[in-house]
Image (tube, rainbow, N blue to C red):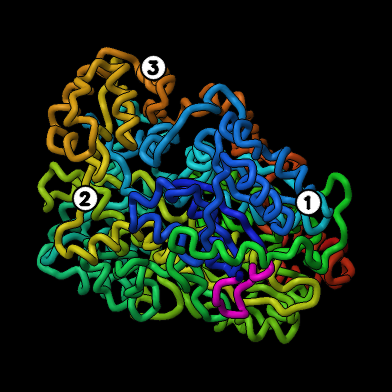
């Protein structure tokens, strides 16, 4: 039953039954992209998601499709028979529904004790909100995204459709593979409880997690009416639209200062620091705006690249669809989505050994593969990883070693996910090129961002570029499983550390390499941070207030996030772990490449497809969501209080009307009727919500089964009843922090895998001597000599840096 696929795809031995709906479907799609056999199980008549033909097609491409009536004993028996031959079952039942069907995790494990059961629900299977329902926009409100979007003092602005749902799917994919590794190494099954709400809180762009370098210039207090984010990653008009710049490093500011003609008022060295430039933005921004005004986006981007200044044009969806870069790299392709529907769509997240792990087959027609159900074997040979069986308390990835060359947010997140699950992650740093995430306001100590992103790792100070340093690194490669890097394209090759070269030393090595726009295509040399990536991919154009003049830079409302940095790091971790699984006990490693731009483009898949079908008609929709009425952001009683309500279907409408007293007239019981009277309906609903606090609105409507949530602010995450009940934050202490900080407790709740430790992030080179001694066998006298040469870079108190012998 395996779809036609390249033999290089790493998860080709993985069998998955997919019973999910909505955002959870994208988890199975990602696993299928990586080669897994994913069988989408639908009820008679089809999934309710098929009403959105394009969205369903993209979330279910590369899957097989069968129909089973799970309310019928025969259908349930067949599903349990299929579960005995599967590795993973993905499901999104609420607990009462699973119990009624006789398909709880316990029921599934009774059929197959070695099964990994992944429950992907809106708020998790435990806690006071376990029975609540959500949509993507409701999760944006509940998960803290909405409170950072929109202009201060105005209505909060929903992010573009697709971004929040993507976060859920990628997190679920990582949790699935972690549990699968544990299953292979122990023979025991696992239940994974994925809360979409927690995935957004901890994964989209966490308030208590790794942030970009620009965090050094942000206020420590969270403004009640949304941050004034215009100057975080400022946008300027130019001759043919807008551009965005990211001035983070000192050298970038110095280059901008020179480009401006070295104005005397900004010559003071204090402007090398981000906070000083923020404070002077009312004087600095007009100078930059005047410089940019009569130049095109392309001219400014190229000149910025030449000067070492990160600049990107703000592209519309139509421009993204026509961009040569995305065509050349295969990011966007014209594809058949099913039943004669053809559109330009993203093909997939990553490349493996130079081959795109993406769109191969369209989503299945209803019941397309029913005839193949009987062909599945009841049992098969268990896979192997080439790792020893796990000790009782060991974490799933114990025994794996990662050489972490990653920097900033992407690098921190990828390595942290491995470290949290027991891998020995060695963060390799060169003091001449420090990780920008270490930046602190006063130039010393450690910031919380670095502590969050680098927990549970060890630190090695090593000059890779030196004649003596490169051989030491190659010795470490011989004992490693994964090299993770996110330098500009070609850097690993220039250092002699391409996958081809490293595979000569260690044929089983996996190399994960990432950059903003990838190693191919006309944009490969462009500088990129998350804000520039989303500008170039159409995300910023969609994340705009449509009620403001399109020429006004203040209309763009995406300044308070570094998306897609975090999600891209998690995509990279999923792909890297898949490659480690795919090499098996004795197979070769693979080269994995992630272009962070592709991550943003994939999230916009359905929107891009619609834009390709109707050029010039798809742009920022703001809070007036297409295809649902009423839906959007509504005022609540209190100081700047808001909620998001979304009526998914006609049944939701009748439930809403029953609670709120909205007119349940015959023409409003169908979507077309509600669309025709949208303004009237939503005005009446806003009047009803404005008299009630957000939680009262949520309690009343959730009791009726209508998706709704109040807007959650970041500080309030720590006292949120659902997050508290699920113990979602644990304290993270570090000797260089003045006090412990709250940190994500886990990626998901596992039935037998313990929560990650909160081990302190390493100081620069902290474990250098220990690593070189224990892994490479050098004695202290040898290490002293290498330290004195500057090749090894331990902490300042290392004995090799003193006149006394070690």
Q: What's the distance in space between the residues labelled 1 and 3, CA to CA?
A: 41 Å
Q: Is residue 360 above or below residue 715?
A: below
Please name the residue shown 56% across and 22% down the image.
Answer: 128
Q: Is residue 62 left or right of residue 605?
A: right
Under circle 2, the secondary element is loop
Viewer-proximal residue, 771 or 168? 168
Give the labeled residue for mark 2.
620
Give the labeled residue for mark 1.
114
Disc 2 vs disc 3: Cβ atoms closer than 8 Å?
no
Q: Residues within 10 Å of mark 1 (few under 14, many from 20)?
A: many
Please name the residue shown 74% across and 54% down the image.
Answer: 84
Disc 1 vs disc 3: Cβ atoms closer than 8 Å?
no
Mark 1 against mark 2, which lies toward the viewer?
Answer: 1
Q: Which residues are magenta?
A: 2-14
Q: Which image quarter: residue 365?
A: bottom left
Is 444 colored magenta in this rendering?
Answer: no
* Percent of width and height locating residue 300: 22, 70
Viewer-proximal residue, 59 or 64? 64
Under circle 3, the secondary element is helix
Report the magenta stretch's main SS: loop
Q: Residue furthest top?
A: 691
* Percent of width and height locating residue 392: 88, 46
* Percent of width and height locating residue 264: 22, 57
Give the labeled residue for mark 3.
700
Please name the residue shown 59% across and 81% down the image.
Answer: 495
Which of pointers 1 and 2 lies earlier in the amino acid sequence? 1
Please name the residue shown 10% across and 67% down the image.
Answer: 294
Mark 2 against mark 3, which lies toward the viewer?
Answer: 3
Which of pointers 1 and 3 lies earlier in the amino acid sequence? 1
């Amino acid at each position: 039953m395996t779809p036609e696929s390249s033999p290089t795809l790493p998860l080709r031995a993985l069998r998955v039954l997919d019973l999910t709906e909505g955002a959870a479907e994208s988890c199975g799609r990602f696993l299928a992209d990586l080669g897994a056999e994913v069988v989408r199980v639908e009820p008679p008549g089809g999934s309710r998601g098929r009403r959105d033909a394009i969205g369903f097609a993209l979330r279910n491409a590369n899957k097989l499709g069968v129909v089973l009536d799970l309310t019928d004993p025969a259908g349930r028996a067949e599903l349990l028979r299929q579960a005995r031959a599967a590795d993973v079952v993905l499901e999104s039942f609420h607990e009462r529904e699973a119990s009624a069907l006789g398909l709880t995790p316990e029921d599934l494990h009774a059929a197959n004790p070695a099964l990994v059961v992944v429950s992907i629900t809106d708020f998790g299977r435990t806690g006071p909100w376990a029975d609540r329902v959500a949509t993507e926009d409701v999760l944006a409100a509940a998960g803290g995204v909405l409170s950072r979007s929109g202009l201060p003092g105005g209505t909060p602005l929903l992010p573009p459709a697709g971004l929040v749902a993507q976060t859920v799917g990628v997190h679920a994919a990582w949790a699935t593979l972690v549990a699968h590794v544990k299953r292979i190494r122990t023979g025991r099954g696992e239940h994974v409880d994925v809360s979409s709400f927690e995935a957004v809180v901890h994964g989209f762009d966490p308030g208590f997690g790794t942030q970009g370098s620009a965090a050094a210039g942000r206020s420590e207090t969270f403004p009640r009416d949304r941050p004034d984010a215009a100057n975080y990653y400022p946008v300027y008009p130019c001759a043919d639209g807008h551009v965005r710049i990211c001035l983070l490093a000192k050298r970038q500011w110095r280059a901008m200062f020179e480009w401006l003609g070295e104005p005397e008022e900004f010559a003071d060295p204090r402007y090398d620091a981000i906070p000083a430039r923020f404070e002077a933005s009312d004087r600095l921004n007009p100078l930059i705006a005047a410089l940019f005004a009569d130049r095109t986006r392309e001219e400014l981007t190229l000149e910025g690249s030449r000067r070492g200044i990160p600049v990107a044009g703000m592209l519309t969806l139509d421009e993204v669809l026509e961009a040569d870069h995305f065509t050349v790299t295969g990011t966007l392709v014209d594809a058949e989505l099913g039943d004669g529907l053809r559109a330009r769509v993203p093909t997939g997240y990553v490349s493996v050994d130079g081959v795109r792990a993406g769109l191969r087959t369209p989503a299945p027609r209803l019941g397309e593969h029913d005839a193949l159900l009987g062909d599945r074997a009841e049992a098969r040979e268990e896979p192997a990883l080439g790792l020893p069986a796990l000790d009782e308390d060991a974490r799933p990835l114990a025994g794996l070693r990662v050489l972490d060359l990653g920097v900033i947010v992407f690098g921190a997140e990828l390595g942290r996910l491995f470290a949290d699950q027991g891998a020995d992650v060695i963060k390799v740093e060169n003091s001449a090129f420090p990780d920008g995430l270490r930046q602190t306001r006063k130039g010393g100590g450690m910031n919380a961002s670095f502590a969050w992103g680098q927990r549970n790792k060890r630190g090695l100070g090593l000059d890779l570029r030196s004649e003596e340093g490169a051989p030491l690194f190659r010795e470490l490669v011989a004992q490693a499983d994964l090299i993770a890097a996110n330098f500009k394209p070609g850097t690993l090759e220039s250092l002699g550390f391409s996958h081809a070269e490293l595979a000569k030393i260690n044929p089983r090595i996996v190399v994960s390499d990432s950059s903003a726009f990838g190693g191919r295509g006309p944009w490969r040399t462009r500088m990129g941070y998350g804000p520039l990536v989303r500008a170039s991919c159409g995300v910023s154009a969609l994340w705009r207030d449509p009620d403001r003049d399109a020429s006004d830079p203040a209309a763009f409302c995406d300044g308070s996030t570094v998306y897609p940095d975090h999600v891209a790091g998690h995509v990279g971790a999923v792909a890297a772990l898949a490659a480690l699984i795919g090499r098996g006990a004795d197979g070769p490693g693979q080269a994995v490449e992630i272009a962070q731009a592709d991550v943003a483009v994939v999230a916009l898949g359905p929107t891009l497809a619609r834009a390709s079908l109707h050029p010039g008609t798809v742009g920022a929709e703001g809070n007036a969501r297409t295809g649902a009425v009423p839906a959007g952001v509504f005022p609540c009683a209190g100081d700047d209080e808001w909620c998001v309500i979304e009526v998914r279907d006609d049944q939701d409408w009748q439930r809403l009307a029953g609670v709120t007293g909205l007119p349940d007239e015959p023409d409003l019981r169908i979507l077309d009727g509600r669309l025709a009277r949208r303004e009237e309906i939503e005005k009446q609903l806003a009047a009803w919500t404005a008299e009630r606090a957000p939680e009262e609105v949520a309690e009343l409507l959730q009791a009726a089964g209508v998706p709704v949530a109040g807007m959650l602010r970041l500080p309030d995450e720590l006292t949120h009843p659902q997050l508290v009940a699920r113990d979602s934050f644990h304290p993270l202490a570090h000797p260089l922090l003045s006090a412990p900080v709250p940190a994500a407790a886990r990626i998901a709740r596992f039935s037998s895998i313990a929560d990650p430790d909160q081990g302190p992030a390493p100081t620069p080179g902290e474990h250098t001597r220990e690593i070189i001694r224990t892994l490479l066998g050098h004695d202290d006298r040898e290490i002293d000599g290498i330290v004195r040469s500057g090749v090894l870079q331990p902490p300042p108190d290392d004995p090799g840096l003193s006149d006394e012998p070690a």
